[in-house]
Amino acid sequence: MATSPNMADDLSSVFLESTRSDRISLEIKAANLIGYDGYAPKPREVYLFGKLEPGWQITKPLLLTIDEDSNGSYISDNEFHVYGYGKTKAEALEDYGNSLVEYYQILAVKNDGPTQALLAHLQSFLLATP
């Protein structure tokens, strides 16, 4: 895709005239034009569904982001802000599953209203199975 030599100037002027949400949207579009950050590949998004680990099941598709670099793989979600890390994607997914279950267990022992609302939302995705 050809771009004008003054593309950065054009984007800057648009940023100054836009609202915050418009600016974020345009930044994403600009990042896509140059290939994320110019060097790194874009993170991959996948849905997690089904058996997570023994005794736990994802009952509604949960969008995960997989990002890899020279140190390993990172898996995260934007729904609960949980992440996992590993030298391989399989290790990162296992760590993510452990973290999500741990988050569930932490929320389950708290009895205040906001925490119970978070737990109810998490329970709409994650189910303890016998």
Image (cartoon, grey):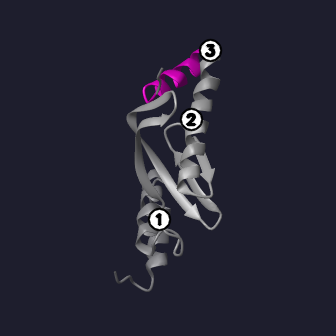
Secondary element at tag 2:
helix
> Which residue in the protein does label 2 denote?
100
| Residue 117 spot, x, y in % from top left | 52, 20
Query: Looking at the rendering, which quadrant does residue 1 occupy?
Result: bottom left
Q: Residues within 10 Å of mark 2 (few under 14, many from 20)?
A: many
Q: Residue furthest left?
A: 1
Q: Going 48% across and 52% down the picture, which residue do you hit?
A: 65
State the separation of the CA atoms marked 3 and 2: 20 Å
Secondary element at tag 3:
loop
Q: Residues within 10 Å of mark 1 (few under 14, many from 20)?
A: some
State the separation of the CA atoms marked 3 and 1: 39 Å
> Which residue in the protein does label 1 denote?
42
Secondary element at tag 1:
loop
Q: Going 58% across and 41% down the picture, which residue do you hit?
A: 82
> Which residue in the protein does label 3 denote?
112
| Residue 109 spot, x, y in % from top left | 64, 17
Measured along the vertical axis of the image, is residue 112 above or below residue 20?
A: above
Queried whether the magenta region covers residue 113, the answer comes back as yes
State the separation of the CA atoms marked 2 and 1: 24 Å
Queried whether the magenta region covers residue 68, the answer comes back as no
User: Which amino acid does the dot numbered 2 rest on?
Assistant: Leu
| Residue 40 spot, x, y in % from top left | 53, 71
Count of labels in the image: 3
Closer to the eye: label 3 or 1: 1
User: Which amino acid does the dot numbered 3 rest on?
Assistant: Asp
Whichever of labels 3 and 2 marks the residue nearer the N terminus, that label is 2
Of residues 42 and 53, the one nearer the viewer is 53
Q: Going 60% across and 19% down the picture, which residue do you hit?
A: 108
Q: Which residues are magenta?
A: 112-126
Mark number for residue 81?
Answer: none
Which SS does the magenta portion mostly show? Answer: helix
Measured along the vertical axis of the image, is residue 112 above or below residue 30?
A: above
